[in-house]
Image (cartoon, rainbow, N blue to C red):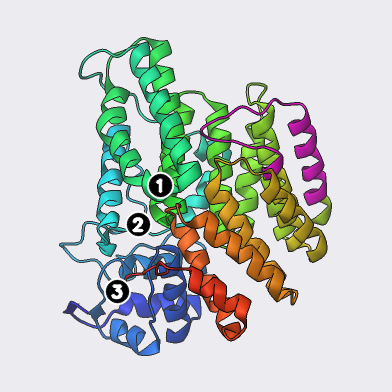
């Protein structure tokens, strides 16, 4: 606690409106902290202190506001919750919807760099209201305002340079994880792409630079998601969506909406994940290639299964198979999809529908069919398979899968993989006296994910 003032009647009023106890609010804040990559252990006495006028350190006021927003179904700011003061410049977690693309990319890059140095007050909260807005057709087509041209004129050479950088950074993160490229990608968007978005150019070059900027921002959203910086990932995705709209690029818009859906699903927001997947499908213009349509259909299948809609899930998987059959699968920096991806989504749907034997079969297929350069994805699927095997009482099989997981993850820098290592340890600890489990635990030489405590 850093300051104290008069009793917080605004927060008391919100708690009454939400019909929440202090315990309920504390638990909600702890859950939201996990989404932001933090480990908090608040309980009712802390909420009592906030009601008495104590002000928690950032970003807790934003977490309280987001918890109230989700509970009440409307946007609540930290100021609404009685926390902001005259020196608080971050009243909400969604402060980057500005009209200048370059300024937004600069602000996000600064926060990404701060997050790298573990200054946790800089982290944006994953705002569910912003996610729900992006599922709206009108909001997902919001354009950036045209900037007044400044700087030297750009041409096809700059576009080609940006496309080459996109391909390079994408290939690195697919193999080794988002942690290796996150800072470099955010900096590149800020210092190179941002000025090019405002530079004089021909109309064709202007659309092309916005299109490649949208793809880079989509990739930046994904690598922040991979590093479990979910608030920043959300905002990079939203920036990518606006850049794609400005470029009239339905391909990239569909890829961004699919990425937002995957993130929402991973965080447990199943209803919102389905809306976003359906929004991605609506972008299925003739210009969208078959492999991306298949990827979107596969994500629709997963989100339908997540809410118990078996028929739609199976229909979408069949459509994904058809689009994949009709499409040559290129090596693309965003929206990549192949037989291994489809098998993984078949396995995920089977898991959600309770068909565990079928799920295990498809996860094994997904591992076999993953290209060698997708090291991070292969590691995460191996972990998912091991968890399933252990839940079915197959301890030896789970240990074998985890041995492969550890081997696959040694060169990967991804917080999702680190979290999987931590989960593996926790699940194997009760079997530590069993030789195979002990062998897996000994094989993990690096510490699990370290989460800052506020």
Residue extent of the magenta highlight = 312-340
> Residue at coordinates 49% horizontally, 74% vertically from top-left?
442
Is residue 174 shown left or right of residue 87? right
> Residue at coordinates 78% horizontally, 38% vertically from top-left?
321
Which is nearer the eye, 259 or 355?
355
In the picture, the disc for residue 205 is none
| Residue that extends furthest to the top in the rendered view of this protein | 202
Between disc 3 and disc 2, the foreground one is: 3
Residue 219 seen in render: yes
Which is nearer the eye, 11 or 212?
212
| Residue that extends furthest to the bottom in the rendered view of this protein | 45
Tell whether label 2 touches label 1 (CB within 8 Å).
Answer: yes
Task: Give the percent coordinates (x, y) of residue 333.
Answer: 51, 33
In this figure, which residue is indicated by the disc labeled 3? 454
In the picture, the disc for residue 235 is 1
Q: CA distance from mark 1 to mark 3?
A: 23 Å
Q: CA distance from mark 3 to mark 2?
A: 15 Å
Task: Give the percent coordinates (x, y) of residue 351.
Answer: 74, 62
The C terminus: image quadrant: bottom left
Residue 143 seen in render: no
In this figure, which residue is indicated by the disc labeled 2? 124
Q: CA distance from mark 1 to mark 2?
A: 9 Å
Question: Which mark is first along the chain, 3 or 1?
Answer: 1
Question: Which mark is first along the chain, 2 or 3?
Answer: 2
CA neighbours of label 2 inside 10 A, class few (<14), some (14 to 19), many (20+): many
């Amino acid at each position: 606690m850093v300051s104290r003032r008069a009793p917080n009647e605004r927060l008391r009023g919100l708690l009454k409106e939400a019909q929440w106890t202090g315990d309920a609010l504390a638990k909600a804040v702890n859950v939201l902290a996990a989404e932001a990559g933090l480990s908090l252990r608040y309980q009712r006495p802390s909420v009592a202190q906030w009601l008495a006028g104590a002000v928690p350190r950032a970003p807790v006021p934003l977490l309280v506001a987001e918890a109230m927003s989700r509970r009440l179904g409307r946007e609540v700011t930290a100021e609404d919750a009685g926390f902001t003061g005259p020196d608080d410049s971050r009243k909400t977690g969604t402060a980057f919807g500005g009209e200048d693309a370059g300024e937004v990319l600069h602000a996000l890059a600064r926060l990404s760099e701060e997050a790298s140095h573990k200054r946790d007050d800089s982290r944006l909260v994953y705002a569910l209201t912003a996610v729900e807005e992006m599922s709206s057709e009108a909001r997902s087509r919001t354009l950036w305002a045209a900037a007044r041209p400044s700087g030297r004129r750009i041409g096809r050479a700059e576009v080609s340079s940006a496309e080459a950088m996109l391909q390079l950074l994408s290939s690195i993160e697919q193999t080794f994880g988002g942690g290796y490229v996150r800072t470099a990608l955010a900096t590149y968007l800020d210092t190179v792409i941002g000025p090019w978005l405002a530079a004089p150019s021909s109309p064709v070059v202007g659309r092309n630079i916005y299109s490649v900027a949208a793809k880079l921002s989509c990739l930046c959203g994904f690598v922040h998601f991979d590093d479990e910086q979910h608030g920043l990932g959300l905002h990079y995705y939203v920036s990518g969506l606006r850049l794609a709209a400005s470029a009239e690029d339905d391909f990239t818009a569909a890829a961004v909406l699919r990425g937002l859906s995957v993130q929402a699903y991973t965080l447990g927001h199943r209803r919102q994940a389905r809306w976003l997947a359906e929004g991605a499908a609506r972008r299925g213009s003739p210009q969208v290639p078959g492999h991306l349509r298949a990827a979107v259909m596969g994500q629709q299948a997963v989100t339908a299964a997540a809410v118990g809609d078996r028929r739609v899930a199976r229909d979408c998987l069949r459509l994904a198979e058809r689009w994949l059959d009709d499409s040559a699968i290129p090596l693309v920096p965003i929206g990549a999809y192949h037989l291994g991806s489809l098998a993984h989504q078949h396995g995920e749907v089977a898991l959600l529908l309770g068909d565990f034997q079928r799920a295990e079969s498809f996860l094994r297929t997904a591992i076999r069919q993953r290209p060698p350069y997708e090291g991070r994805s292969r590691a995460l699927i191996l972990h998912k398979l091991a968890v399933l095997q252990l839940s079915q009482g197959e301890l030896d099989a789970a240990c074998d899968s985890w041995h492969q997981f550890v081997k696959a993850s040694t060169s990967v820098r991804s917080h999702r993989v680190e979290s999987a290592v931590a989960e593996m340890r926790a699940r194997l600890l009760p079997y530590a006296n069993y030789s195979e489990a002990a062998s897996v635990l000994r094989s993990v030489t690096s510490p699990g994910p370290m989460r800052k405590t506020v």
